[in-house]
Image (cartoon, helix red, strand yellow):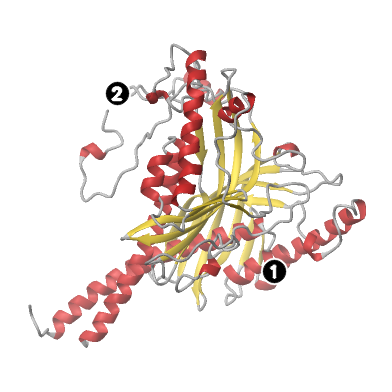
Amino acid sequence: MKIEALRAKGEEALHDAVMAYAYTEIANIFSAFTWYLRAGQEERAFEKLWSRKESIAYVSCGKGYRGQESVRAFFVTARKKQREEKLPVLAELFPDQVKNEPEYLGAGDYEMHWLTTPYIRIANDLKTAKGTWWSPGIVAETDTDGNLRSYVRTINYGCDFILEEGAWKIWHLREFAEFSYPLEENLLDMQGREQDFGAALELTRRMGTGIPKPNERRKWSGPCTRTRIPGMIPDIIEPYNTWDDCLSCIRDL
Amino acid sequence: MQETYTEQELQQVEAIFDKAEHQAKKALAWQECLNDYCAHVLHYHGQKQREDIETYWSMDRYDIAYGHGDHGFIGKAQVLDYFAGMNEKMRDAKLRYFSGKFPDRIAYSPEYIGVGDYCIHAIFTPHIQVAEDLRTATAFLQSPAICSELDLACKQAPMIEWGGYGATFVRDDAGWKIWQIRGYSDYGLGMEGWMIDHTDRPDPPYPTVAEQLRAEKGLSSLIPDPDFTVTDRGPLTRYRIAAVEPEMQAPYETWDDSISYIRDYPVVGQPEEGDKL
């Protein structure tokens, strides 16, 4: 076989492999985006996931923000200020659980946007990509009466991505509203109550076939409550070369 | 560095490339099959069943199939008649009814086709197995669905339906395409119409707590004014027309602003250094 034909074969294999890999990176980035939202870490999301181009844009249900300053003001700063202004109210409502100090910002906040039905298309030149997802979500926060109010919020996402210095970034993000409705007040608040798995678990307990005792127990932030501080649990793992036990999701057990 | 290679050495390198190429093509096939299935679901959401079948299903195979549990439709004509034709006839019948009953809101006119329709069979937990010969693939996908249409009183009548799908895919001359689908329903139950109907209520339904606090004090919103606004369809109402939104991007070679998800926005400024793609 001539060397030129071999080189062409190698380049084709490389192109296909890079394209396949790009799909997984795009999927990872958008999953990370929703994971940061869940943790109330918009600043980290903006720094890590968004392009540095001035042509970035974020459009939420018809209202558009363009450019680094504008998108940051909408996505990061406004949310941060809202938490800062709400914190003294929560500290007064729940003085034993919430202090008017920075580490309590976001107490009671919950925002989860699951990603379903992914359609991801990478350009053949491997420089840009586009993706859509249908997203059922739940958004909750503690109100001035101390109740955890929540609602279902479903949206469609359309997102343009760009390859920047070897890493894929969010370039233009657009949200299309589907529908929202409120949930029963305090439905998500697990304060003072066990998670209720209903009749099924009770039946297995009576039959003596209940869940075996675990080997270890460790403290964790716990389920959603009116005062829980959202956190990155588990945290997003950066690219790594080889296994180390400190990467494990059970490293504290 | 070695400057000449034996035929055997070249063959060894070729074998490595072949293996890499095969693995890459399997990964790409997995992605294309998932893309196809999600495109099918999103076209159903947009009430574009015929376009879905003609774009994402195999038009080469004589035995494409659409099944539900214990019954199904096999063959191109049968699948088109069932999935596309049946839905088209239903939409026409509904449009005649609603335009007659509510002429001030709905006209018997093409732009109103799909009025009030809502159907999303969201795809979760995909498991896709691509054959080693890269000619076929099989999958199962789980799907909680919400579907709704207008009832005779022109109100949304949604239901949820949870279940899953088995699907097979084939690689024909046009690429990876859907070959057969079989749906399995676990349960379905009605929802209250108001939950998804925004005809008389805004979206999002509530301002945030911080915004309420500021409004009570007569302070301005913390949310900055947008740089621009565009007219989106908006959330689901009794009168929203089903559409594939955002649209599916066909395979493309290189970037053009005309394919951007923000192409309908006003152009601002000039391209930056290094912006050309």
Where's residue B166, x and y in %?
Answer: 54, 56
Instruction: Give the spatial CA distance, label 1 vs label 2.
Output: 57 Å
Front-most of B225 and A38?
Answer: B225
Q: Residues within 10 Å of mark 1 (few under 14, many from 20)?
A: many
Where's residue A118, x and y in %?
Answer: 51, 55
| Amino acid at dot 2 | Glu
Front-most of A33 and B222?
Answer: B222
Q: What is the number of the mark on residue B67?
A: none
Mark 2 secondary-structure assignment? loop
The residue tagged 2 is A216
* Residue B164 seen from this side: no
Tell me the quarter of the picture where residue B12 sits.
Answer: bottom left
| Amino acid at dot 1 | Leu
Circles 1 and 2 on the same subunit = no
Q: What is the number of the mark on residue B80?
A: 1
Q: Locate residue A23 relative to residue B34 in the image: left or right.
A: left
Q: Is residue A100 above or below residue B54?
A: above
Residues at discs 1 and 2 in contact (Cβ within 8 Å): no
Furthest-left residue in this view: B1
Q: Is residue B141 above or below residue A89?
A: below
* Residue B187 seen from this side: yes
Chain letter for the residue marked with disc 2 in the picture: A
Quadrant (top left/top right/bottom left/bottom right) for the N terminus of chain B: bottom left
Furthest-bottom residue in this view: A2
Residue at x 86%, y 59% (from the top left corner): B107
Chain letter for the residue marked with disc 1 in the picture: B
